[in-house]
Image: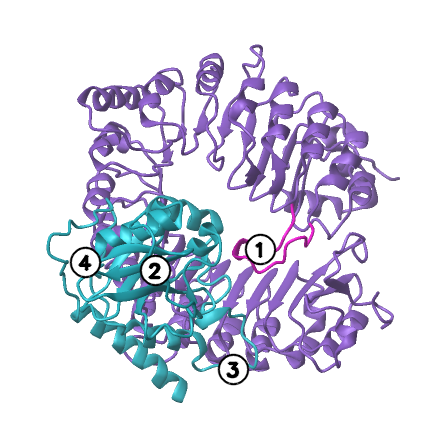
Chain colours: A cyan, B purple
Amino acid sequence: MSSMNNLSESGKSGMNLKETELTLGLPGEPRVGKACMKRVFSETVDLELGNSGKKDSSGSGSSMKKESATSRGKLVGWPPVRAHRKNIMTVKSGKYVKVGVDGAPYLRKVDLELYNSYEQFLSALEGLFTCFKIRTVLDEKKLMDPVNGVEYVPTYEDKDGDWMLVGDVPWKMFAESCKRVRLMTRSEAIGLAPRPETKCSSSSS
Amino acid sequence: MAYSFPEEVLEYVLSFIKTDKDRNAVSLVCKSWYEIERWCRRRVFIGNCYAVNPRIMIRRFPEIRSVEIKGKPHFADFNLVPEGWGGYFHPWVVAMARAYPMLEEIRLKRMVVSDDCLEMIAKSFKNFRVLVMSSCEGFSTDGLACIAANCRNLRELDLRESEVEDLSGHWLSHFPDTCTSLESLNIACLGSEVCFSALERLVSRCPNLRKLQLNRTVPLEKLPNLLIRAPELVEFGTGAYSAELRPELLSNLVNAFAGCKKLKALSGFWDVVPAYIPAIYPVCCGLTSLNLSYANIQSPDIIKLVSQCQNLQRLWVLDYIEDSGLDVLATCCKKLEELRVFPSDPYDVEPNVSLTEQGLVSVSEGCPKLQSVLYFCRRMSNAALFTIAKNSPNLIRFRLCIIEARAPDYLTYEPLDAGFGAIVENCRELRRLSLSGFLTDRVFEYIGKHAKKLEMLSIAFAGQGDLGLHHVLSGCDSLRKLEIRDCPFGDKALLANAAKLETMRSLWMSSCPVSYGACKLLGQKLRRVNVEVIDERGTPESRPDSCHIEKLYIYRTLSGPRVDTPDFIWTMDEEGNTPQ
């Protein structure tokens, strides 16, 4: 059955992931030490191999027309863990999302629950990727590499799998729906940030 | 000449007959026994609040002192039952306030309870003693304040996993100084800080306090003072188990725990700082129940703890325990009867801990009394299930959740039919089973053939077609509750086994290819059964009869169609008329 082949692939890719685990960090950066939680997979490297596993778990082997799925194969009420168990665990463990920058060889992870506003969040990003400075252009928060003048537009993937511009919705709404963040170079982000260039006003917030 | 047995004698004899099953049997002997029995029944259990109504209950049993009622279907725990479904306690409390002024105990599960209900309880029942609300919702701390203030002889207040609107912690201060009757207090589900001095005073003046479960906000520093005031404690739940490292706090805790000589059960343990775990070592050898399912401690610490609990009968723990910890459990805890392993990170496909099927195999090997299992893991094999079945023939509850839906045997890539088949074949006393992993209709053939004592079955993402469901409905003689989601079971099996549905408490099906037309047919065929279509897309009449419905809930009932359905539930009419 083809369904079983899909499932076997997911099992195999699960094995491969473990073998590719690396532990690197940016020079000069302290490990973000969130106590107690042992992670088999280091926070600092993501080779994006996990996607195949995720895809397989959702739709394989189903002859059914309808599945109770939300986006990207995530199933409602599965695995059957009660809400109060989920909440109690996640309250303290934070909401970690991956942050990638175009051109950087590896990603970082930040805990969105530590911040209450876009300003705080972008400052944190500035701290993580120390080559950046935050420039405020009108109301748009942008990150800029002062060395080569390249501007980065912060974008994020939301719950529905769409890539959005950071900053449009209230902070809390963003924090809840954000799954990962990517700092795109301005040229790539043409569709997302169509505002014309103006003279940069004040510096970092 | 007719010989009649004096009523008083029979009543006296009946006072020794406690269980519902026995009482029901007694009432079937003859009309006079039915009459005598119904007047002296004191306790009633209603497994589905819509199976009867208050009027029927009161008419038959006029002298009830203790009532237990369950509302929403089990799958409500996993957000499969839409908001506003029902399960309201209000009509019950209104009727009982009039009919049962001497009511002492109310136990509710998955019901909607408002503050008004709580106020009514507080004001209507002079001898009220026990309120247990398990997984309930709809009330706030204001309602609790009312209970605290007015129930003079309150013995038990247990909020077990309920969702409470937490307005403030001051409700606890409403217990009057004259209240000294409290034996059990469980507020673990509450989010906000309770007034600690009020709690301390309450604990001090209640000499019979046996069970106390605090909520997360009670700091570790406060525990010693609390514990020394409650030396009779049998069950204790901590708050957050963390504080900065201070030697005097550790020694205070050690002494405080050691002072509770009757302690048998521990729970709580949010946010654990491992350095404080040794504080409970003195009580470990007496523990029969340990709930670490909120504790973010790693395998080595769990091992140190568990290896001292030789008398442990029940362990709830996160998968941080890992296979290595379960090996130790198997070696040290020979009296273990119940094991629940919860996932620390349920939504990540990749494992974050080294917990596999092997851990469960070890426990089944080492713990001969193992009866009840709930196990979340990321891989399973038929071979492992064979071994577990062979080692644990006395299993009563077996709930296995392989996190990835439809995951096959990770060694052979085959379905897990044979493994689960071995479970039902060997475990003759099995009453509850939850399936997961890749399963064909075969597994249902085995279940129908062997699981003769099975009362509750949960199925998800399994089977190939109607035949699977048919095996279950036609074969499982003792089946009472069946809940199914995302399986290719449809009209044929349901219609062919309609009569079976009259012998069960309830059937839940969601995301299965059951057509509206079949539901209407079932509604016509079945007497004294409610066939409820749940569909949030608007009336099923607006779509063809062949269209699949979203969710289906079928249950036997004496009180006819519900009168409190929300606008997304349609009850199929017995006449085959268009439902309103």
Residue type of the residue flagged with mark 1: Ala
Front residue (pair B115, B438): B115
Tell me the quarter of the picture where residue B573 sits: bottom right
Real-space CA distance between mark 3 and mark 2, rounded to the nearest whole angstrom: 64 Å
Q: Quadrant of the N terminus of chain A?
A: bottom left
Front residue (pair B579, B557): B579
Real-space CA distance between mark 4 and mark 1, rounded to the nearest whole angstrom: 49 Å
- Residue B290 horizontal/vertical position (percent): 35, 39
Does residue B72 appear to the left or right of B97 in the view shown?
left
The answer to whether residue B502 is visible is: yes
Residue type of the residue flagged with mark 3: Gln
Real-space CA distance between mark 1 and mark 2, rounded to the nearest whole angstrom: 56 Å
Chain designation of label 2: A
- The residue tagged 1 is B76
- Residue A64 horizontal/vertical position (percent): 54, 81
Real-space CA distance between mark 2 and mark 4, rounded to the nearest whole angstrom: 21 Å
